[in-house]
Image (cartoon, helix red, strand yellow):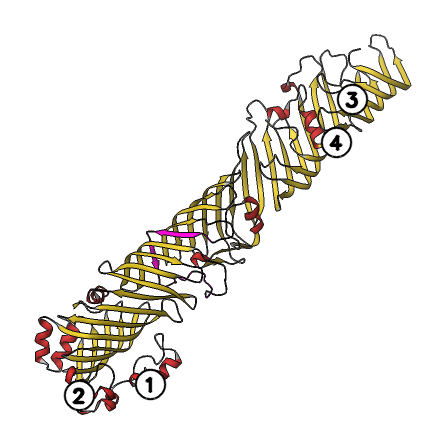
Amino acid sequence: DKNVTRADLSNLQFAARFRPDHDPDVFLGFDYENLDTVFIRDVPPIEAAAGHASLIDSRFVITTDRGHVTAAQGGRIDISGTSFMIPDVNIDRGPAGARLKTDSTITAALSLLDEGPFGFMTKANLPVTLADGRAQMSGQLDFLLKNDLSPDEVAFSVNGRLSDLRSETLVPGRVLAASGLDLHGDNAGISVSGEGRIGGVPVEGQWRTALGEESDGTGRVTGSVELSERFADEFRIGLPPGSLSGAGRANIEITLPPGEPGRFEMRSDLSGVGLSVPQLSWALGTQATGDLQVAGTLGEPPKIDSITLDAAGLEARGAVTLNDDGTLSRAVFSRVRLGTWLDAPVELQGRGAGRAPQVLVSGGMVDLRQTSLAGDGSGGGGANREGGPVSLALDRLIISDGIVLRDFRADLDMSGGASGSFTGQVNGGPQVTGRVAPKDGRSAFQIRSQDAGAVLAAAGMLRQARDGEMNLVLVPVSGAGRYEGSLEVKNVRLTDAPALAALLNTVSVVGLLDQLSGEGIHFSEVTSRFLLTPRRVTLMSGSAVGASMGVSMEGYYDLESTMMDMQGVVSPFYLVNSAGGLFTRRGEGLVGMTYTMRGPVAQPSVSVNPLSVFTPGMFRNLFRRPPPGGGGSDGLAPERQRQQRGGGEAGQ
């Protein structure tokens, strides 16, 4: 009377069996067509249904061969194959159930689940227009045949297949698309799982939201996502072009509170992923692994609250801020460690789409024995991308064992390799200024000072040097931390120099000894060519000349142990003695004595060959060992060796 609006019945069958002292056994069966009926109050009715119904021993079952329900949104829901059952019609307000089988749009299916006593989507704070596509579902509904049915009195379990799905709601701000996903729903929650794409990025996982009184409608996505350059482009995380190569997987979890941007956490072992940070001359190959963790908030643009990277010797921890167009605004890393050569806070400041960011390093340490300031310029191994500007404010720039520039400040242009100016304090003492320029993928340095003596003393070369103007050039050669250098010093004065005192004492130049212990010996010019490695200075040629004396020197100095092994010629009264300099090396007069100096710098052992004083300068090499550069770790390049063997200024 209340629920059936119309129906055409056919093939009616009725049977009854009566036995004494027993309720009658009744059977009723019929086919039907054009059935319009309400099946649950406050839910759209079944329309144009056809099928069969039966009543056997108080159990009523009706099945549909065809029929539909018109949902409030999304169109018709085909219910062919659905059945409805009352286990016992004699029980007032008793239980009933439906075995569902539906085919519809996803919107229509969700709209039906949000009707009347269900209200599942409303409780989840989700729209019924969650996704476009088709839904084929089967499941079970159990409820009581009573008025004012509450949601708690409806139990449901449904499984389905969603095909050709497209959603802009499941992951806010992103289009989720899939050819097929599995759906499961029950009173505890709704979940969708399978493989699909977010934008152009392949993903695999599950979206789930809880149902019930305690649910606040928060959804969660768990699974994995492809980590590649198209991931960086889709999620607009501000990486410069080319930073990512290859493809790997990252585990991801996204929490989606209703009405708020989603929060995400991602982690990857970076297998199959290539990473590159040209500004640090660092790269991770696709065959290597590491640990990458990123956490932040989805949105336009997304916000990256924390990023942690530990791979290929690089450790970095920081946060990233993006501009509205998804380009990098700032990336602030509280600490970046790369091998043993970099340990400092680093900040990257974006300069627009497609441009390398500006790098700011404030504090910390860089060790040039193991790297270069050249970054990834055009000479740096084939990467031709434009480099960004770099500003350094380091606590320490380590050049070699025992030589450190403290309070190092530099502003560099990396567009073609590192070039720019810098200042620093040698071992925390005198200040030097200079310039850096790209050279064969590394950095060459020119260092100047108006107090050469203080610089040489602070570097541990000449402890009691004073005054003078210095020009030092360091050019990188093959091998980490190796430089070929030239030094020019004008008008320097030496006082209380143990090595020089020992030499003068050996050759018995009394007046010069007094001068050394007094105002000092003045040298108008000091020049040298040397090879600097992380642990040793190989002096290939050196000279110091003044009115009082001239000295030439070549040999080795160990920076770590401060041990020396030198040889050369000392020429007293050089202003007069240098008259024969046309036939001698720089710093040697026509008359001079060869010497060797070995041992600690503070107290070397000096020996002089007195016979060499009678040897004209052009034949003095007869009393010398071959000059440094004949091979080994501190050897010169072959062409340099040939030039050195030529002797004299022309040979040099």
Query: Which residue, given by chain and number where applicable, does mark 1 sit on?
Result: 645
Which class describes the residues within 10 Å of circle 1: few (<14), some (14-19), or many (20+)? some
Q: Earlier in the sequence, mark 1 or mark 4?
A: 4
Per the image, is 617 magenta?
Answer: no
As shown in the figure, which amino acid type bears the numbered disc 1?
Arg
Q: Earlier in the sequence, mark 2 or mark 3?
A: 3
Task: Residue 244 in the image: state x and y as whole percent.
Answer: 53, 53
Distance from disc 1 to disc 2, alpha carbons, whole Å, reads 22 Å
Closer to us: 16 or 410: 410
For the N terminus, the image quarter is: top right
Secondary structure under the numbered disc 3 in the rendered image: strand
For residue 268, above or below residue 552: above
Q: Earlier in the sequence, mark 3 or mark 4?
A: 3
Query: Which residue, given by chain and number where applicable, does mark 3 sit on?
Result: 46
Which class describes the residues within 10 Å of circle 2: few (<14), some (14-19), or many (20+)? many
Secondary structure under the numbered disc 2 in the rendered image: loop
Distance from disc 1 to disc 3, alpha carbons, whole Å, reads 106 Å
Distance from disc 3 to disc 4, alpha carbons, whole Å, reads 14 Å
